[in-house]
Amino acid sequence: MSEQSRSQHHRPRRGAESGRGGRRSGPPPRPRDPARRVAYDVLRAVEQRDAYANLLLPVLLSERGVHGRDAALATELTYGTLRRQGTYDAVLETCVDRTLASVDGEVLPLLRMGAHQLLSTNIPPHAAVGETVDLARRVVGHHRSRFVNAILRKVSARDLEEWTAIVAPERDRDPSGYLSVVHSHPRWVVKELARALGERAKDAGLPRTEELLKAHNERPRVTLVAKPGRSKVSDLEEAGAEPGRYSPFAAYLPEGDPGAIREVRQNRAAVQDEASQLVALALTRVDARGEDRRWLDMCAGPGGKAGLLASLAGQRDARLVASELQPARAGLVAGAVRRAPRDAGRAVVADGTRPAWRREAFDRVLVDVPCTGLGALRRRPESRWRRSPENVVELAPLQRELLTKAVESVRPGGVVAYVTCSPHLDETDVIVQGVLSERDDLELLRAPDYLDEVPDLAAGPEGRYAQFWPHVHGTDAMFLALLRKRNG
């Protein structure tokens, strides 16, 4: 890719740029280096406004007409910088003569983005420094651009391997600290992931944990779901997708915009991680031991699982109530279940901790509780920097209450699926065991038995939980527990 061609100005001919009264007659000139400017604006919004890159980046690319190689570069700079931010911060700390926390919030994304280009891409160092400094001059001014230039020149003096040898702790003495720096995760996250995997610090450097951290830093493939009764995987194959590995409704899109696929535009298919599809499917495979007409998705926003469940319910002449507390998210749920077979899905605005339905009203209940999202760090790399151990403590009472209300909402003989997009044991096993300890009317089913097509899922007591892993299954780290409510 030519750095020179990407960064040149578009200069209209003199006389062609002005109309009557000297006003510009055409669209405003394309900004210099639009790829880096988009990446910078997203990184700054993530840092200062808690924006999500996966939501903001496509909007800015579209609004600014950034396509092709420029869009690819903007995407790489945005996600690459966020994924490796911890590593780059460790390097930058040694290059700045004060704490990194004291660096201006407008400048820090420039330093990180420049470090990414220098240490993890094939962009020539002179172009990485020069183009980033030029952007700095335009967005933070000449004086601070000189600071950016000085720091990035220090960074460019060594490659990533050399910097790692300097800034990372020794692996034998501090394996969690080593993996934290090398694979760019907060230390507490490394420790909790190791705990969830059953590894201890003395286990020869936490090899399985390292494989998981590596997977988090890889770009995830786009996975689609063909909604049953409305489309088929073969339809998505005709649009260039490949059949999924596990889910009968999944297809992988190697490249391109999912929104350009007809079935996606028509709401007959959607983007959905394969593990998300499978935890919903597992719920439908359990024998409900009686009538099977009333299903509930208790925390349905933004609607991915609800869309699939509504389609499956319609094929069985069942009905799905998809409940969501936030009205805006409930609107997304309504769109996801719209035109399900037999119009089987209905979205409602309701608080799962204060159910708007009577007790024991449902045959099947899915409760995908709010969580730290540590299972989706491939798709939302910035989440690793936003979460803290305190968030786990804060969420636990809500998670436990929602599971309790889910159990109260299902009839005897019915089944509850407790789901999180986090493998953190305090959000999974601890919550489930806490509710089980308070009741004598629940049976913990062996969830992997309902997903025979997926290997290496078993986790928890007697392998009764299903735990997906990015490095094993190529999915988000979804957790599933299935509980049956006993009769009497």
Image: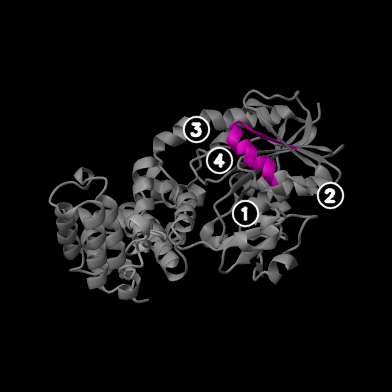
| Image x and y of residue 278, in percent | 67, 53
Residue 365 - label = none
Distance in Å between CA atoms under marks 4 and 1: 22 Å
For numbered disc 3, what is the local secondary structure?
A: helix
**Cα–Cα gap, marks 1 and 3:** 24 Å
Q: Quadrant of residue 138?
A: bottom left
Q: Residues within 10 Å of mark 1 (few under 14, many from 20)?
A: some
x then y, percent, for residue 399: 56, 33
* Dot 3 crowding, Cα within 10 Å, few <14, some 14–19, many 20+: some
Q: Which residue is mark 2?
A: 315
Q: CA distance from mark 2 to mark 1?
A: 20 Å
Report the span colored magenta: 321-336
In the picture, measured across the screen, residue 437 lies left or right of residue 338, that is left
Q: Earlier in the sequence, mark 2 or mark 4?
A: 2
Q: Which residue is mark 4?
A: 428
Q: Is residue 322 part of the magenta span, yes or no?
A: yes
User: In the image, what residue type sits under mark 3?
Assistant: Leu
Q: Amino acid at mark 1?
A: Gln
- Residue 61 left/right relative to 476: left
**Furthest residue to the front?**
20
**Contact, mark 1 vs mark 3 (Cβ under 8 Å):** no
In the drawing, what numbered circle is on residue 272?
1
Closer to the chain start, of discs 2 and 1, is 1
Residue at left offset 77%, top offset 47%: 339
